[in-house]
Image (tube, rainbow, N blue to C red):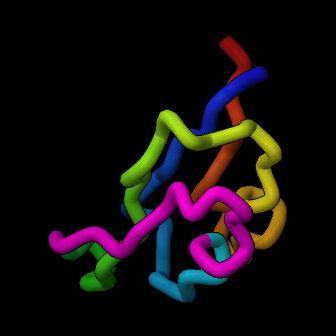
């Protein structure tokens, strides 16, 4: 099915992906990235269904779906 991979240094913390995720897999990270933002992180990865809605709504192309 696949899973998502985040590039935390590309994330500008718009959190559109967090709102779009039907399984609420993503959360705000507590560490800043190289841009000075608090990026998203995978918090409940076992709940991910591989729909990749998060990757489609990300304006910074910081999320991609990878296949196992």
The correct choice, above or below, for 31 with respect to 6 in the image is below
Q: Is residue 47 left or right of residue 27?
A: right
Extreme-top residue of the structure: 68
Chain part drawn in magenta: 18-31
Q: Residue at x 71, y 25 (%)?
A: 2
Which x, y percent locates residue 36? 25, 84
Q: Quadrant of residue 68?
A: top right
Rendered view: 2 above or below 24:
above
Q: Residue at x 48, y 81 (%)?
A: 12
Q: Residue at x 18, y 73 (%)?
A: 30
Which one is in front, 45 or 29?
Answer: 45
Residue 53: percent from the left, percent from the top? 80, 59
Q: Nearer the viewer, residue 4 or 7?
A: 4
How many numbered badges does the structure rendering display? 0
19 vs 38, nearest the viewer: 19
Magenta stretch containing residue 19, yes or no? yes
Residue under the image location 62 percent in, 53 percent down:
63
Q: Quadrant of residue 56?
A: bottom right
Where on the picture, by quarter, is residue 40?
A: bottom left
Compared to residue 36, the image places residue 7 above or below, namely above
Quadrant showing the N terminus = top right
**Residue 28, percent from left and from top:** 35, 74
As drawn, 25 above or below 4: below
């Amino acid at each position: 099915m696949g899973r998502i991979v985040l590039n935390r240094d590309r994330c500008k913390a718009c959190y559109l992906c967090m709102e779009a995720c039907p399984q609420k897999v993503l959360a705000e990270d507590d560490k800043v990235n190289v841009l000075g933002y608090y990026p998203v992180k995978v918090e409940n990865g076992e709940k991910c269904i591989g729909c990749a809605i998060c990757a489609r709504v990300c304006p910074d192309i910081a999320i991609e779906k990878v296949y196992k």
